[in-house]
Amino acid sequence: MFAKNKEFINPELYPKLIKNELLESKDIAVNLYSVDPGKVHKHYLKLIFLYISIVLFGMTMMILSSIYVNP
């Protein structure tokens, strides 16, 4: 999607972390054949770790709230 439409995202409205990740993903997509494969793997592993952390944190909060709010 980034390679076909280089102006697909407008990251000015996003938080700094998400903005940086989107811009890095866009850079990788636009320059796919000239980017080091190690950089691509590292970037996407970082994103996977971030998403898993968010999901685990959310599930932990749901469990804790169900234990303490609804005993």
Image (spheres, grey):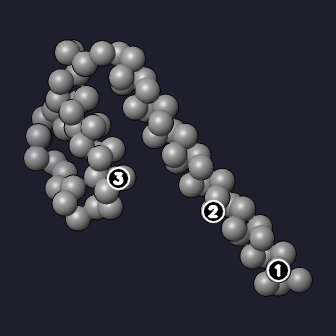
What is the quadrant of residue 41 in the picture?
A: top left
Mark seen at residue 68: 1
- Nearest the viewer among 46 and 3 is 46
Q: Residue 70's quadrant in the figure?
A: bottom right
Local SS, label 3: helix
Question: Taking 36 as reference, is 29 above or below it?
Answer: below
Q: CA distance from mark 2 to mark 1?
A: 15 Å
- In the image, taking residue 11 as reference, residue 15 lies left or right, namely right
Give the side of residue 12 with respect to residue 14, left or right.
left
Q: Which residue is mark 2?
A: 58
The amino acid beneath tag 3 is Ile
The quadrant of the picture occupied by the C terminus is bottom right
Q: Residues within 10 Å of mark 2 (few under 14, many from 20)?
A: few
The residue mark sitting in front, 2 or 3, is 3
Contact, mark 2 vs mark 3 (Cβ under 8 Å): no
Q: Which residue position is annotated with label 3?
A: 18
Q: Secondary structure at mark 1?
A: helix
Label 2: which secondary element: helix
Three-letter code, disc 2: Gly
Q: Count residues near mark 1 (Cα–Cα under 10 Å), then give few for <14, some for 14-19, many for 20+.
A: few
Name the residue: 52% across, 47% down.
Answer: 51
- Whichever of labels 1 and 3 marks the residue nearer the N terminus, that label is 3
Q: Residue at x 60, y 54 (%)?
A: 55
Give me the C-alpha separation between circle 2 and circle 3.
18 Å
Mark 1 → mark 3, Cα distance in angstroms: 32 Å
